[in-house]
Amino acid sequence: MTARMTLENVTLSLPVFSFDSYSLKKKLVRLGTGGRLQREAGHLVVQALRNVSLDLKEGDRVGLVGHNGAGKTTLLRVMAGVYEPSAGRVIAEGRLVSLINAGIGISPEATGYENIVLCGLYLGLSRNEIEAKVPEIAAFSELGDYLAMPTHTYSAGMLTRLTFAAVTAVDPDVLLMDEVIGAGDASFQEKALTRFNALIGRAKVLVLASHSEEWIRRACTSAVLMSEGQIVDVGSTDKILADYRRMLEGS
Amino acid sequence: MTPSPFRAAWSDIREGMGMFDLWWTVSYNQIRHRYRRSIIGPFWLTLNMLVLAVTLGLLYGALFKQDLRTHMPFVVVGFLCWSFLSLSVADACNTFIASANVIKNTNIPLSVFMFQDVGRNVLVFAHNATVLVVLYAVWPENLSWGILEFVPAFALILLNTAWIGLLLGMACARYRDIPQAVTSILQMVVFLTPVFWPPEALGERRFVLDFNPFYHALTILRDPLLGRTPPVQSWAVMLALAVGGWLVTLVLFARYRRRIAFAL
């Protein structure tokens, strides 16, 4: 299957319903971080993305950089099909996996094994596909007998191991990630790195939003700098990261 | 080409139903985990229901001067079916709210969350329904071949709870006052519907029940379980509700489906 992720002039206005409309006196407020806020038909609207165009094809590994609230996660959600753009369009081809929130489907009452299966099902695998992967995921997690215990008995590190092992077992064409998934203690980190590299290697298109320069450099071949819901610049990782640093110093 | 919203809504429902592995596993886990550390587990549901139904059966039987032999089974089965109906409607409010985290981070069909709720409530009903075994052992005259009519009746009710799950789920995600209103309406409806009292008690004013959809839903579920044949009129009302409800839901689901994530 071919993989592709194309955005054409994508604009997204996010309505904010949980906002007390009376507490906002000004017509237009501009904050230091986040998209523009404005009122529309009585409720508050965030201009989360403005005129974003990107064309990603097989082999593209793109890092999304920008300060908090620049629109990175929102952009990933638009790519994932969670948010429908207010204007413009999204063309996505290939099996898409979004790891915007890696802990998805993890239920503290379920055992490690049950959570591996749930996690796979949520990520779009069939029961047979995930059942076939369970032994490998279990072995990788090194959790042994703990896998038969409910995950609320796990330490934070054990839970990270489980989540990491489960979500990295997928075979995506298009992989969307919001920050690199944590990988537990030092002994685990090295093999986690190998596994993570294998995952992004399998993906035909990678979009990684991260604040870690190291990871952007390591996983991506190009990068996109975002600010206030717009793409400021696209280029090599070195160039964009330098731009970003200049932008942070300037503000 | 972007598909029409209507087509997209329809394939959301089709694909959602197709993800049986996911929603059934989640439904099943939700029930199991709720009772994980209890000894009799999900049969607390059954016991809880039995205690309430028997107490209220005795109370209302005395109040309405009913023969316990007919009134007790009427109340037990009525309460069994009512619990399913009210739970389905109450849960419909949270179809999308409860799964906000998943909805905002993955692109799985939204109808999955409705099927998950329907599945869970069917499981709860199946546990509750074990009281029927006790009931038929004590009052075997209630069991007849007429019970077979329960199967299509339950299917028709599920068809209705499915659209209610999507429609109320959407409305409640956007307007957070609706769940509160629904809770309060359900508390009222349980007294307006002949769950604990016989319809005959209304005398000449019995016709008001015709305007209560919960009465018709309850009737087509309850009558077969008591060896009676439900009136054709109740079947007709539920069938009309299913068709009308699905039409309205499909139109609104097509129009607002993509906005659900915004409201969460």
Image (spheres, coloured by chain):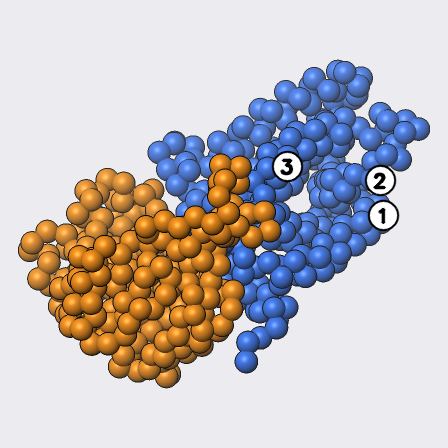
Chain colours: A orange, B blue
Quick one: A115 or A128, which is closer to the camera?
A: A115
Helix, strand or loop at disc 2?
helix
Disc nearest the viewer among 3 and 2: 3
Q: Position of residue A143 (x, y in %)?
A: 17, 51
Q: Position of residue A139 (x, y in %)?
A: 17, 60
Same subunit under labels 1 and 3?
Answer: yes
Disc nearest the viewer among 1 and 3: 3
Residue tagged 2: B210
Quick one: A117 or B77, which is closer to the camera?
A: A117
Q: Quadrant of residue A215?
A: bottom left
Helix, strand or loop at disc 3?
helix
Disc 2 is attached to a residue of which chain?
B
> In the picture shown, does residue A242 fall above or below B196?
below
Helix, strand or loop at disc 1?
helix
- Rendered image: mark on residue B182: 3
Q: Are marks 1 and 2 in contact (CB under 8 Å)?
A: yes
Q: CA distance from mark 3 to mark 2?
A: 21 Å
Q: Position of residue A34 (x, y in %)?
A: 36, 53
Q: Quadrant of residue B186?
A: top right
Figure quadrant of the N terminus of chain A: bottom left
- Rendered image: mark on residue B233: 1
Comes first in the chain, label 1 or label 2: 2
Q: Residues within 10 Å of mark 2 (few under 14, many from 20)?
A: few
Does residue B157 appear left or right of residue A190 in this picture?
Answer: right
Q: Amino acid at mark 1?
A: Gln
Q: CA distance from mark 1 to mark 2?
A: 9 Å
Disc 1 is attached to a residue of which chain?
B
Comes first in the chain, label 1 or label 3: 3
Q: Amino acid at mark 2?
A: Asp
Quick one: A91 or A186, which is closer to the camera?
A: A91
Q: Are marks 3 and 2 in contact (CB under 8 Å)?
A: no
